[in-house]
Image: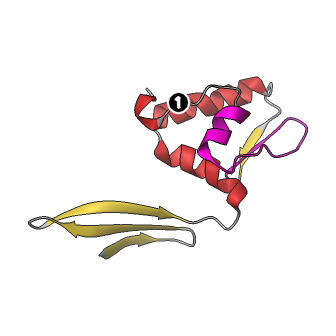
Amino acid sequence: VRVVKRGPRYMRAEVAHGAGGAVGVDLFQTADIREWGVLFFIRTGPADYVRRMLWHWKLYTMYRGRIEANRLWNEDGTAANTNEERDVFEALHLTWVAPEGRK
């Protein structure tokens, strides 16, 4: 294992695999379980899908909601329950879509 990048809550490593190859591994850490769902949703991607869904959040909250510190905040200032990735879809009032079905 070779650490390529390290931050206070993120690490990227390369793990030796096969004949001279390597597999990249991203590790994310959160001190608050309530951040996990949004963090996982963003990192699962794909990026265009995530951007569209977070734009949906802005429209749904009539631009009064916000995304901050890996949390979805409602227009009334309360944080949405997003302990799990599936909770993000519920907060967005959307049907769950498995990662492989996100286009």
Query: Callout 1 environment at 10 Å: few (<14), some (14 to 19), or many (20+)?
Result: few
Q: Is residue 71 magenta?
A: yes
Residue segment shown in magenta: 69-90
Query: Looking at the picture, how far across and down is residue 94, in whole percent?
Result: 65, 25
Residue receiving disc 1: 97
Q: In this view of the protein, can residue 6 be seen by the observer?
A: yes
Query: Looking at the picture, how far across and down is residue 44, in whole percent?
Result: 47, 45
The residue under the point 35% across, 69% down is 13
The residue under the point 43% across, 26% down is 103
Query: Looking at the picture, how far across and down is residue 66, in whole percent?
Result: 76, 40
Q: In this view of the protein, can residue 46 be seen by the observer?
A: no
Q: Nearer the viewer, residue 35 or 75?
A: 35
The residue under the point 36% across, 62% down is 25
Classify 1 as above or below 66: below
Q: Amino acid at mark 1?
A: Val
In this picture, residue 74 sits left or right of residue 18: right
In this picture, residue 84 sits left or right of residue 10: right
